[in-house]
Image (spheres, rainbow, N blue to C red):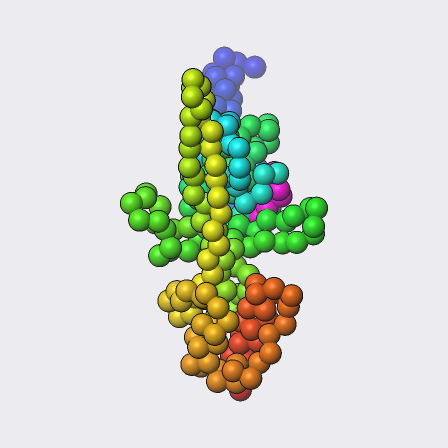
């Protein structure tokens, strides 16, 4: 085989290798997760912004009471971003003090989610319950950097029944010590969100007044449940069923 033919073949091989690399890079740059597809920890690394954040460094002290998190244990969750992409079976801890989300990457390292998410669905393996958290604007504390906070959606539909857990932190340093003792206490608030507006709910009468404006028969409804949360869920569920039936007529 002549030298010219060998050189020509080498040039062709290099061309196709470069073309293949360019196509691969272009495909990766244009790739998007389709709405509703199953993502994983690899996809999180590829599509969402994260940063290393050891949880032990969050408080710089000894927590004597309470917790920063919705649950202290790592719990499997499905994350949904603003484009509707899903990332399933992600071990998470939801910080309800500063409203941050932490997760374990595929190597077991703790990461903080920096990209904006819209929904977190956490499965409690111990109880079997599923907890849905939505990012809600208008409820953030004054003089904070937060624009929105994570609230648990107890009932969804035309009317959303939301549960906001506000955590407050107090500190003390024992005499002669240098490690602060931290106390974290919870306060729970309820809201109904309708037509983009938030209504605070402190008692069942409040809920009845809000819902009866569009469904008057809610005044005759007898709520079901052993505590106020279950009773309010049944009332909002009844309201959403009525609204759905009205729209189907």
Classify 5 as above or below 42. Answer: above
Q: Position of residue 152 (x, y in %)?
A: 52, 55
Instruction: Report the residue at 54% width, 45% height from top.
Output: 70
Quadrant where the image shows the N terminus: top right
- Whether residue 65 appears in magenta in the rendering, the answer is no
Q: Nearer the viewer, residue 90 or 34?
A: 90
Whether residue 161 appears in this view of the structure is yes
Instruction: Report the residue at 57% width, 34% height from top.
Output: 104
Instruction: Report the residue at 57% width, 80% height from top.
Output: 221
Q: Residues in magenta?
A: 74-78
Most distant residue in the front direction: 175
Count up the numbered dots.
Answer: 0
Most distant residue in the top direction: 3
Classified by dominant secondary structure, the portion drawn in magenta counts as strand
Most distant residue in the left direction: 143
Q: Position of residue 223 (x, y in %)?
A: 60, 74
- Whether residue 77 appears in magenta in the rendering, the answer is yes
Q: Position of residue 157 (x, y in %)?
A: 52, 69
Toward which corner of the image does residue 229 lie, by quadrant? bottom right
Classify 32 as above or below 205. Answer: above
Whether residue 39 appears in this view of the structure is no
Classify 11 as above or below 149. Answer: above
Toward which corner of the image does residue 29 lie, by quadrant? top left
Instruction: Report the residue at 57% width, 51% height from top.
Output: 121
Q: Position of residue 133 (x, y in %)?
A: 51, 53
Q: Nearer the viewer, residue 227 or 50?
A: 227
Q: Nearer the viewer, residue 106 or 225?
A: 225
Q: Nearer the viewer, residue 186 or 14?
A: 186
């Amino acid at each position: 085989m002549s030298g010219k033919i060998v050189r020509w073949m080498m040039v062709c091989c290099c061309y196709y290798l470069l073309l293949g690399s360019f196509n691969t890079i272009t495909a990766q740059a244009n790739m998007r997760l389709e709405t509703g597809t199953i993502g994983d920890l690899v996809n999180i690394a590829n599509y969402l912004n994260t940063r290393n954040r050891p949880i032990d460094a969050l408080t710089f002290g000894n927590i004597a009471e309470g917790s920063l998190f919705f649950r202290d244990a790592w719990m499997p969750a499905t994350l949904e971003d603003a484009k509707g992409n899903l990332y399933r079976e992600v071990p998470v801890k939801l910080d309800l003090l500063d409203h941050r989300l932490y997760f374990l990457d595929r190597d077991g390292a703790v990461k903080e989610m920096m990209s904006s998410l819209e929904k977190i669905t956490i499965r409690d393996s111990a109880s079997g319950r599923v907890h849905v958290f939505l990012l809600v604007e208008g409820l953030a504390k004054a003089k904070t950097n937060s624009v929105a906070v994570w609230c648990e959606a107890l009932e969804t539909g035309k009317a959303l029944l939301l549960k906001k857990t506000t955590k407050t932190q107090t500190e003390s340093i024992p005499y002669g010590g240098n490690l602060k003792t931290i106390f974290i206490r919870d306060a729970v608030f309820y809201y109904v969100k309708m037509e983009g507006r938030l209504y605070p709910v402190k008692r069942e009468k409040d809920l009845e007044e809000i819902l009866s404006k569009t469904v008057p028969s809610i005044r005759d409804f007898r709520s079901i449940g052993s505590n106020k949360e279950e009773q309010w869920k049944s009332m909002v569920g009844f309201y959403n069923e009525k609204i759905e039936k009205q729209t189907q007529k």
